Amino acid sequence: MYTYNEFDEAFVRSRVAQFRSQVERRIDGSLTEDEFRPLRLMNGLYLQLHAYMLRVAIPYGTLNPSQMRQLAHIAERWDKGYGHFTTRQNIQFNWPRLKDVPDILDALADVGMHAIQTSGNCVRNVTADHFAAAAADEIADPRPIAELLREWSTDHPEFQFLPRKFKIAITGAPNDRAVTRAHDIGLRMVRNEAGEPGFEVLVGGGLGRTPMLAQVIRDFLPQADLLPYIEAILGAYNLKGRRDNKYKARIKITVFENGLDAFKADVEERFARLRSQWSGVDQEILKDIEAQFAPPAFRNAPTDDYEAFRAQNGVFRAWTDVNLHPHKVDGYTIVSISLKKHGATPGDATAHQMRVMADLAERYGHGELRVSHEQNIILPHVHKSDLPAVWAALREADLATANIGLVSDIIACPGMDYCALATARSIPIAQQIATRFEELQVEHDVGPLKIKISGCINACGHHHVGHIGILGLDRAGVENYQVTLGGDGTETAAIGEKMGPGFPAEEIVGAIERLVLGYLEIRRDAEETFLETFRRAGPEPFKGFLYGTEETADAA
Amino acid sequence: MSRRFSPKVVSANDLIEGDAVWLTEDDRWTRDMAEAELIEDEAHAAIRLLFAKGQPNVVVGAELVDAAPGPDGPVPTHFREAFRTHGPTNYNLGKRAEGFAPRGHIPGNEAL
């Protein structure tokens, strides 16, 4: 894993010192809120409905145990004992006091973390496949590239005042777990016919009020050309992007209004000019970074005890059936720890749970943890022989819910329980859906199904790419929930289709139940997933389930 | 024809704590909306808002928010403002954990 060099350390410390002084001047009245607001946002500090909120970056979703323990410490010392992991691989603390924030930032710097560029119109935290360096389907570990992008984009003088925020995601695997097509720039690591590493570069994706899937701007970009090419894209966007209208300022609108071909021509022309200015020092830095992401010393051990325990223990078996993912090394597996216990707040972990996960990573996981955009925690390298012990420790900490990828593994933004932008609540809807499906005892039968809930049109809950998407709106002063179906955030990405009228809060859970039970009736067989059934059968039968317009056999 | 002025309270967030506060008739900032001054006159509302905005190192984001008279004092007319008197609904944290009675209608809390 990457550790800060002297430059990183000095930079982050100096930013904390600057912010400490800015906070002091805000409190003593020398800075107005209008002056202070952009300064606090540059350091990830928002003011929400009930308190400040500090958004801390977890670059490419990777954490070591001491970082996770420090997050637990921050939660206990300066917050209310928990943290919220987000869809952008960040963690948010919901209750910091303004005067404590500089101390929190110092505590983060102690473990090589910061909150810089987690807000504002700049390049945000670069996200990556949460199974990076572990998944069996991977071509290469995307994290060294993500780290290179982090270093390059942090405090980049040309790109601190972009027309709007800018999000980059990268995957090193053909199965896209990083939702690259919903990002301003998506990068997919590929190899050309000669076997050389490079990227398929996508541009102009985004959710929010105008959801669009990113389009390919370059089929194959050689690895060494990455930074000049990204610089060319950002440069083109910086000038062409609309600053007159906040809702038209994202690069997706720039690409859409100019057309991909014209935008690409601008990018390529800039790239041709910029390329020669890059001496190759970035590639040397990349080599140093790559050395820090060397794979751990995997061990070779029998897995018989695991198999035996699995055969005996049905609860453990159910957990292994859904919470494990194939690892590239024999005998190893990727463990997803669900932060979605039925009825719990999606993505929340208590300080105690964070410490348990840190201990497990240290003891059984080669010292690595990941945060997924689906708001779960991953132990990417666990030997199967250790699984019974890992599972037992997770159970004690209320972290052994066997529901990864199932109905109750719901993404939900904080919604109006916390967020000042929200138009309705998300969390209680997620809690009620998960609880309802636990009562019905059907989620393992239903199989893979992604429900994603946003509490406003900005779509932090990724509802557009949920197989079932739920959007909470304010309809004449009442919370109302609109349903979209058929969304997909993977390599077969699609924006969900809006169904009919929305449902009030007390009816949305029943509507989702009808949808899912209806799917069970019409799926071809137990192998056909919800998404496949939707793609085959189209929206009509699902509209019938939602609105009761389907003629029943009796009525016919 | 001018629309009838709907009653307002002045609300903001505390600069240090960040939590919701309301302006009282005697110029204090209270954490219980029931103690807020219910303003029924448009010109007076403008004066009270100016007064609030004149305290930038005490509160942030002072604004006029719709409210209605209630049995114990002003109550919110919109659920967003009701949440601000209550705290998040997923945990017992925020205003209600600090012992303040929620004001207005919290959707789903019909039992309260």
Image: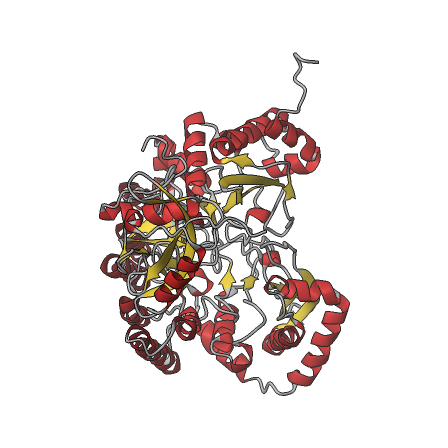
Quadrant for the C terminus of chain A, please.
top right
Point out residue A457 in the picture as x, y percentages from the top left corner. Answer: 55, 51
Q: Residue at x 60, y 58 (%)?
A: A206
Quadrant for the N terminus of chain A, please.
bottom left
Chosen colour scheme:
secondary structure
- Would you identify the image quadrant in which residue B51 lies? bottom left
Q: Residue at x 25, y 61 (%)?
A: A78
Point out residue A182 in the picture as x, y percentages from the top left corner. Answer: 60, 57
Nearest the viewer among B14 and A423 is: B14
Nearest the viewer among B30 and A458 is: B30
Point out residue B91 in the picture as x, y percentages from the top left corner. Answer: 31, 44
- Would you identify the image quadrant in which residue A189 lies? bottom right
- Would you identify the image quadrant in which residue A388 lies? top left
Q: Residue at x 64, y 27 (%)?
A: A544
Residue positioned most to the top: A554
Point out residue A486 in the picture as x, y percentages from the top left corner. Answer: 63, 41
Residue positioned most to the front: B1
Examine the rendered structure and indicate whether residue A206 appears above or below residue A473. below
Left or right, A409 with respect to A242, comes to left
